[in-house]
Structures are given as C-alpha cells and as structure tokens.
C-alpha cells in the first residue's frame, strides 16, 4: 500500500497532465456581490492561486440570480436563499409567484451586471484568463496558455417571456443554461433546495420547450441539475424523440448533481436518470455541497464524495463523470462580508481537489479514469459544443 503522501504526489502529476475542469461555480454572482461591497481583484486574490496549484484550466461560472432580486421591493433585512431561506420573511418567492408580481426585468439587469463583473476581472488578467466562447479558446486552454472561464445561466427566469433576451445573453458570452433554479418560473419548475427532501410537482411549459429548442439552435447546452423529476421526464422524452427523428442535438448535462442511490436528495439523480443522461452523451459533475453529498462529518467528506464518483462510474462509465463542485462558502463570505460562516462545502477551495483525486487513487481508481473525471470529459464536451456554433 502506497503512503498517502505518494498518492498526493501522483494526484499532482495527473492534475498537470490534463486541464482540470470545474463545471459549476457561482463565481460571477460572487464577484458582483464583492464588487458592490468595494472589493476588487477578487479572482486574483481568492481563486487564481488555488486554480494554479491544482491545475484548473477551465471554470464554468454560473450566472445565479438570488430570489430577492426579482421581488418588487427587496426586504430591508435582506434575503438569503442560496442554501438556507429566511423563513421569518413571509413574502418569499412562492408568495410573489402566486401574486404574479415577480419582476423578470430586474433579474435580467442583474444577469447583465454579473456578466460585466466577471468580464471586467477577466480583462484585468489578460495573460492569465480568457472568456471561453469559441473552439479557439479551448485550444488556448489545451496548450496550457490560459485559464478559461465559460459562462452559463443557472436559471432563465430573467428572460420572462422575451425570448430575444436569450440571443442577447449568447452575444454576451453565455453558452448554456438551466431552465430554472430550485423555484418555479415561466419555463419550468425546479426541484427542492438542497436541505429539503420533497418531490416538487410541475411541468415544463410550452414556452420552456421553445427555449430548449432555442438553446439547441444557438448550440448552447441544457443543464438539468435543478430541474424537478416531472420536468426531467419531459426533457428526456423530448431529446429521445429528436434523436429518433435523426436530429443532432447537443446532449443535456447535469453540471452539479450526485447519485440519489448513494444519498437520497432530490438534487441528485436516480439510476434511470443517470443512465438516460449517459446514453444521450451527457456528463454529470460531482457536487461538493455537504447537503448533496450527504455527509455532515468533515472527516468523512472525501470518502463520501468518492462513494458518489465510484458508484456513478460503475453505473454509467468514467466517460460520463466530472467535477461540478458548486463551492458556495466563498460566495457566502463575500455576501455577508465575514469569514465566520457555517461551512457547507466538502472542499474548502479548488486546491483541495488534489485531496479528492489522491483519495480516489488510494481507493483503487485507475489513472485513466481519473484523467477523464478531472478534466478530459468536460473538455471534450465543451470542445464539441463550441464546434457546433453557427
């Protein structure tokens, strides 16, 4: 048995062999929040050293818009909804949704502000970073020249009924989207939030199906991580029908979801869902949120994440598994301007991905499978996605 130190060295070597990819990080939203608090050079200070240490060369940043942004009047006390909603506030998303009072245009303005914030920080480091929108950008990453950031919408609530906004987002660099976060909107219904354990009913609307077809037309990916079960059934049926008709659709993916069999949380995917996702060419990214991993003991975090990865690999093959960590602790620290928070991430930063890789190796995973999971799968997927652009 190798010493743990040797496994870590082996992990470091593998992380330098291929570009490492994280397919989900709420980076753009965090940057906007920190900029609004007066912070600057956030990527350079808080992220770049850890990305470099672990060989990360592609970060997929979501544009995540908090519930309160859409409210007619933002409560003076603020509203924290990312993982733990403020239950003392009686006027939450569902209240305004039922009253038809949600302001989609406010969400769109916030999305544009997030895109501006992250683009600004990318431009501040032209020798280190690039916005990924073309296959040429992927080539830069593969050559080891720069760290790429690819943008996608974690929910398209903000377009309301104005489908031209999707084209606007594409022109600004957005290359994928989920229909909704864990909430209902005009397109679809989301699953429950990470700390809930309930199946949320609700179907994809005709407008939502139009959006799916528009995503395909723009060669943008569809992320099903926050979609409810009923909506997923519709998506899978739609994609299956198109495949039977000979259509060449971009495979849908799950940027940050784990195995329901390992931990029964509705943010995770069941065996039939994972199998269907893999059969149409999709990939699922390991989520490192402790509520989705299903581990409350820091001593068990790595092994609990490995349990999910190993199960997914056994079920659908290593070529359909990647990283999609959804590291939210830094987001919360920026939002509340404090280092004292209740930890939600199984990994404290991207550098700790080396610990996860080392544990996978220690538990017997082959180097070939590890290389696919840490980067090759996502890199090949996005290279194909971008090559389909008109």
Image: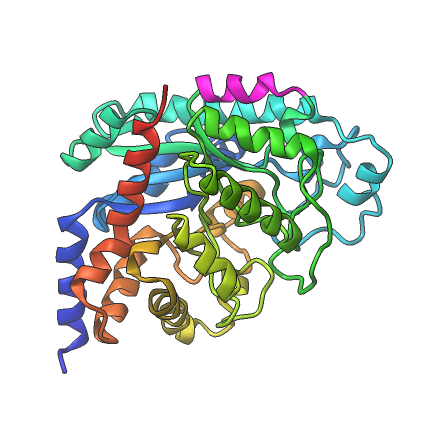
Q: Residue furthest bottom?
A: 1
Left or right: residue 128 versus residue 97 is left
Point out residue 390 in the picture as x, y percentages from the top left corner: 37, 19
* Total numbered labels: 0
Tell me which secondary structure the magenta stretch mostly adopts: helix
At 13% across and 63% down in the image, what residue appears? Answer: 9
At 29% across and 27% down in the image, what residue appears? Answer: 130
Query: To which quarter of the image does residue 366 belong?
Result: bottom left
Q: Is residue 7 above or below residue 386?
A: below
Could you say which is closer to the camera, residue 342 or residue 179?
179
The residue range painted magenta reads 162-171
Point out residue 219 in the picture as x, y percentages from the top left corner: 42, 28
Judge whether residue 170 is colored magenta: yes
Q: Residue furthest right?
A: 99
Q: Is residue 354 above or below residue 155?
A: below
Judge whether residue 311 is colored magenta: no
At 66% across and 55% down in the image, what residue appears? Answer: 192
Point out residue 365 in the picture as x, y percentages from the top left corner: 23, 70
At 58% across and 65% down in the image, what residue appears? Answer: 265
Query: To which quarter of the image does residue 353 belong?
Result: bottom left
Could you say which is closer to the camera, residue 48 or residue 364?
364
Q: How is the image coloured?
A: rainbow
Left or right: residue 1 versus residue 117 is left
Residue 292, visible in the rendered structure: yes
Residue 37, visible in the rendered structure: no
Quadrant occupied by the N terminus = bottom left
Point out residue 195 in the picture as x, y percentages from the top left corner: 63, 61
Left or right: residue 96 versus residue 31 is right
Could you say which is closer to the camera, residue 95 or residue 184?
184
Query: To which quarter of the image does residue 173 belong?
Result: top left
């Amino acid at each position: 048995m190798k010493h743990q130190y040797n496994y870590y060295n082996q992990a470091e070597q593998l992380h330098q062999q291929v570009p490492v990819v994280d397919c989900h990080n709420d980076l753009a939203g965090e940057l906007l929040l920190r900029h609004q608090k007066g912070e600057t050079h956030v990527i350079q200070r808080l992220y770049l050293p850890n990305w470099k240490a672990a060989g990360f060369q592609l970060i997929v940043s979501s544009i995540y818009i908090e519930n309160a942004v859409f409210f007619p009047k933002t409560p003076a006390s603020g509203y924290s909804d990312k993982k733990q909603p403020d239950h003392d506030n009686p006027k939450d998303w569902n209240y305004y949704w039922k009253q038809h009072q949600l302001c989609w245009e406010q969400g769109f303005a916030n999305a544009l502000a997030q895109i501006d914030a992250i683009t600004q920080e990318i431009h501040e480091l032209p020798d280190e970073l690039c916005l990924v929108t073309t296959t040429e950008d992927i080539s830069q990453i593969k050559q080891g020249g720069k760290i790429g950031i690819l943008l996608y919408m974690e929910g398209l609530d903000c377009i309301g009924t104005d489908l031209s906004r999707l084209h606007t987002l594409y022109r600004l660099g957005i290359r994928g989207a989920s229909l909704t976060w864990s909430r209902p909107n005009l397109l679809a219904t989301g699953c429950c939030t990470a700390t809930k354990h309930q199946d949320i009913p609700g179907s994809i609307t005709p407008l939502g199906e139009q959006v799916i077809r528009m995503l395909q037309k723009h060669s943008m990916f569809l992320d099903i991580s926050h979609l409810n079960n009923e909506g997923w059934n519709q998506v899978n049926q739609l994609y299956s029908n198109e495949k039977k008709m000979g259509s060449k659709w971009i495979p849908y993916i799950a940027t940050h979801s784990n195995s329901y069999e390992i931990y029964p949380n509705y943010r995770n995917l069941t065996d039939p869902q994972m199998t269907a996702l893999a059969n149409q060419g999709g990939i699922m990214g390991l989520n490192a949120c402790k509520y989705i991993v299903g581990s409350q003991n820091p001593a068990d975090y790595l092994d609990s994440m490995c349990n999910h990865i190993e199960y997914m690999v056994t079920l659908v093959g290593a070529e359909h598994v990647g990283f999609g960590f959804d590291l939210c602790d830094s987001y919360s620290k920026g939002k509340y301007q404090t280092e004292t928070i209740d930890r939600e991430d199984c990994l404290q930063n991207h550098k700790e991905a080396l610990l996860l890789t080392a544990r996978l190796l220690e538990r017997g995973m082959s180097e070939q499978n590890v290389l696919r999971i840490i980067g090759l799968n996502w890199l090949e997927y996005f290279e194909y996605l971008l090559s389909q652009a008109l």
